[in-house]
Structure formats: C-alpha cells, structure tokens
Image (spheres, rainbow, N blue to C red):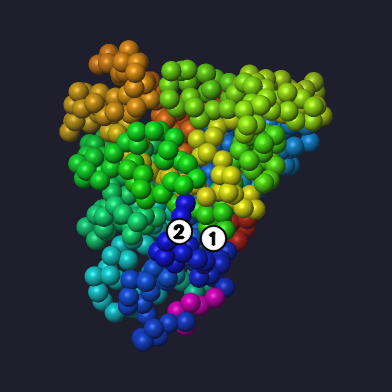
Amino acid sequence: MKFNKLYILLFAGALCTGTSCTKFDVDMHSAYTDDTFPKTPDQFVAVTGPVYTSARGYFGDYFDLQTAGSDEVVIPTRGGDWFDGGKWRDMHFHSWSPSHEVVRNAWNWGFNAIGTCNQVLGILENAEDSDQKNQTLAEIKTMRAWYYYLMMDTYGNVPLVTTFDTGNELPSTTPRAQVYEFVVTELEANLALLSEEKSEATYGRPTKWFAHALLAKAYLNAQVYTGTANWNKVVEHADAVIASGKYNLENDFLAQFMPDNGAQSPEPIFSIPFDPARAEGNQLFNKVLHYAHRQTFDLSVNPWNGWSAQPAYFDLFDDADNRTQQWLAGQQYNSTGQPLIYNGMNIVIDPYGYNLLPGSDFDIGGADEGGRLAGARCVKYFPDKNQANNNAGNDVIVFRLADVLLMKAEAILRGATNGTRDQALEAANLVRKRAFPINPEKHFTASSLTLDAIYKERALEFTFEVTRRTDMIRFGKWEDAMLFKPANSGEAYKRLFPIPATALANNTNLTPNPGY
C-alpha cells in the first residue's frame, strides 16, 4: 500500500514491549505531564500507534494458529524443508500440546496487544476532555475488544484484564462466556462514539462499521462460545453495515488483495496496513510459492515453498468460478510466458501429488523435486514484486462486505426471525453472482441455498482470511477426517487450544483448558 501521513504515524513503531497483559518493562505514564498529554489529532494518533502496530501480528503467529490445522491447507515436510521440529505436522494432525511453539507465540502476541491497549487507555484517560479524546478512547476499547475476541475464540477461558496494572497481582482465568459478554458489551457501549466515515483518514482504524461487523461475527458464533444462539443479533448488525451504504462488493474479486490495495477499495471494512519497509510482516507469498516462482513474479528473493491446498479443498472450486484464479496449479510460467524451469525440471504444480515417503509420518518430498511440486498454491494476496526483505505491501483484510452478507444469510437459515429467506437468498447471491457473473445456472435458488451451501461458499470466498477454523467448528466439521488425518471425533476439547505451558508456569492463577 501507499503510506500517507496518518499511516506513518499509526505504524511508525511501538511505545513499549511486554511479556504479559499486565506487566511491562517501562512506565510510559512518566513520559507524559499535564502539558504534554495529547491534544491534537496527530498527537492522539501518535500515542495510539502501538495498538495498530500490534495488529500486524494477526497475519503472523495468529494466522498460523487459525489456519494450519484447518482443511484449507497442508504444510508437509518437503525433503529437508518445513520440518521445523514437527510443529506443522502437529498442527495438521491436531496433536499440539501446551508447549507447542505456534500455540505459545499466538498467545504472547494477543496478550501483549491487549496489554498495549490497556497501557494506552491509561495514558489517554488523563488527557483533557474533548470529542477527540472520547472517540480515541472508543477506538482503542474497540481494538481491545477485537483482540479479546481473537483470544477468546482460540483459547476460550482467558484472563480478562482491563487496566494497566503495575502491581504484583496476577489475573485468574475468566470463563469463555464471560469474556464473550465483555466483548459484545464493550463493542455495543462504544458504537456511538466511533466514526461513521470510510476514507483514508479512518483506514486502518476501527469505525462504527467495523464494530458492527465484529458484533455480527461474535453473535454468529454465540452458540459455540456460550451455548446460547443469538441469530437475530447477527442480522441486526449485518443490516447496519449493509444499510450504511458505505460498502460495495469489489467488481474484481482479487483486486482488493493486490499489493496496491488500500482505502480506495469499496469492499473492505477493516484492513491492517502493511508496507515492505515501514510496516513489515506480510510474508504469506513466501510461504506458498515454489522457489522457482521468483521468475514468475519478478521477485528479488527465493520463496520458501511450503503451504499448499489440500486436494479436497482445491476440488471445491469450479473452473467457471472467478475465485479459482487465486490458485496456481499445472504448468507454471516465468514472467515472459515461457515454461518455468528450476534445477533442470519443468515446474508443473500437481494439486494431488501428495504421497508420503515409506516410513515417514509427514514427508512427501524426499530429496527430489517431486514432492516439492505437490499442492496448489494460493496467490489471493498477489505476490508483490516490490517486496523488501521478504515483506510484501498488500494490506490484510480482516472484515469485508462479502463476509457480512454471508453471515446474514447463514443467521436467517439458522433461525433468525428479523430476516426472511428471500433476504438470505438475495444476500448470498450478491456474493455468488460476482463469482459466476455469466453463469446464472450457478446462482443460488430457494432450494439450493442451504447451510451446507453456505459452508462451502465460505470456503470458496474466504481462503486464507482467518475464518476457516471458526467456520469448521460452528458447522461441526473440526473433527472430520482430512488429508492423512483420521477423524478425531472423541477430541472435541481440541476446539480450543491449550493455555501455553509458559503462561501456566508464569501465572499459577491460570487454569488449563479441559483435556490438556
């Protein structure tokens, strides 16, 4: 993306670093006095920048946690590549433990971000009262609610801390339903104070429409989180976004994910800005591309050749579906259109080429190139030829209108009474018709729009958008068999990840999740 002054202020750097959600190594309160507390919009933005800088970790450790165990991806060992201590194998087979690296890193990211929010709120509360202060406080509380939603979704029962406490008391575990109630209450309470504007000035910051989208998402999963469904609330908040008139579906599905994406796109509701030099962390292209794709996309680095689609997931896509363009499979070419050659081998990506080596538990590659060519590669976030030091400039979308439309349709099918089946059909078909603009026979009908159809449509629409694990759990699919992995129907406790061993060792007030 292109950075303007606001983005540079927002993402310039962090106020602090931390190791827990209550204890930090520096006291930022001492850096401010009555004369230096923020007063101007730029000063408020500068103080709050670390909250948004933290968001970039959403596309790192948290993306890995949510994605690597789902049916959309497999990350096998390819010869000597991607073994990484077996951590990807454990994610794929759902055999993680409280000591797992990805489990630990995502936890640390989320609670450091929450701690940063609490610290910034502590600073801002002492600033002079103003409309700017009230809006900024609402924005940071909304971001904190989002971070807590992410932690609650993955770990369930987590510590709930809302102040920056420099004392020695350690927080205890809060039940998942109570954390959920905090999230929705906090979002509802701050809605009126958030900006309604969709522009460069609010891009990368939470607006009223971000809060509505997050509330719709939270209510969509309320039955999972609390045992009690709330489908009407999903429709209520989805309708608020739709009725705002601020958002439209992007005509070209993939345009909103390109390296030059940004505030100009009509569909995203909330995005995290990335830049190769000033907002690093988007390295997804490296994870998915074969080494030889350096020649395809005129890259200055060799990609890492790892993540690829499971065959059953790839097979969900219809050749006539515009979204199929996000996949690389078959004969590959360099940037001049010539067949791609690497180490003397013609590079042909085989979506079905997964074959475990004899005696191996997850090695498909061996020492030759065969296994390294297995699996379709997703380039939804199109490779950025201007990447620097393995960092791309594509902004990462957290919420967009298509998700809101499909959430509304699903909630109505599940029993919401403040919407009709005709409205569900209309909402779902807005998404479907973009994918099949010249194939009306592929559009939903009153009889074909079912919950199973919605589940499949979400797979087609949201690959690598950090929705699949949550969708699989909500639809009762998380324990199903998938490539190499047998069904694990007796392990419903793995719908939550374990509280990391390091967190339990550092805080004896925390309670391990059941089953771990």
Q: Is residue 312 visible?
A: yes
Q: Main secondary structure of the magenta part?
A: helix
**Viewer-proximal residue among 392 and 188:** 392
Q: Which residue is mark 1?
A: 278
Residue 310 in the image: above or below residue 89: above
Residue at 32% across / 39% down in the picture? 401
Q: In terms of image quadrants, where is residue 141?
A: bottom left
Residue 89 in the image: above or below residue 110: above
Residue at 32% across / 12% down in the picture? 441
**Where residue 207 is drawn, which disc sits there?**
none
Query: What is the distance, in whole Å, between disc 2 and disc 1 at their CAs?
Result: 9 Å
Q: Magenta segment: does it hold 353?
A: no
Left or right position of 187 against 121: left
Residue 263 in percent (x, y) is at: 37, 50
Q: Are marks 2 and 1 in contact (CB under 8 Å)?
A: yes
Residue at 58% across / 36% down in the picture? 68
**Viewer-proximal residue among 508 and 323:** 323
**Where residue 3 is drawn, which disc sits there?**
2
Say which label, 2 or 1, has the lower sequence index: 2
**Viewer-proximal residue among 173 and 424:** 424
Judging from the image, what secondary structure is the residue with disc 1 in?
Answer: loop
Judging from the image, what secondary structure is the residue with disc 2 in?
Answer: loop
Residue type indicated by callout 1? Arg
Q: Is residue 93 visible?
A: no
**Residue stretch rendered in magenta on the structure:** 26-30
Residue 342 in percent (x, y) is at: 75, 30
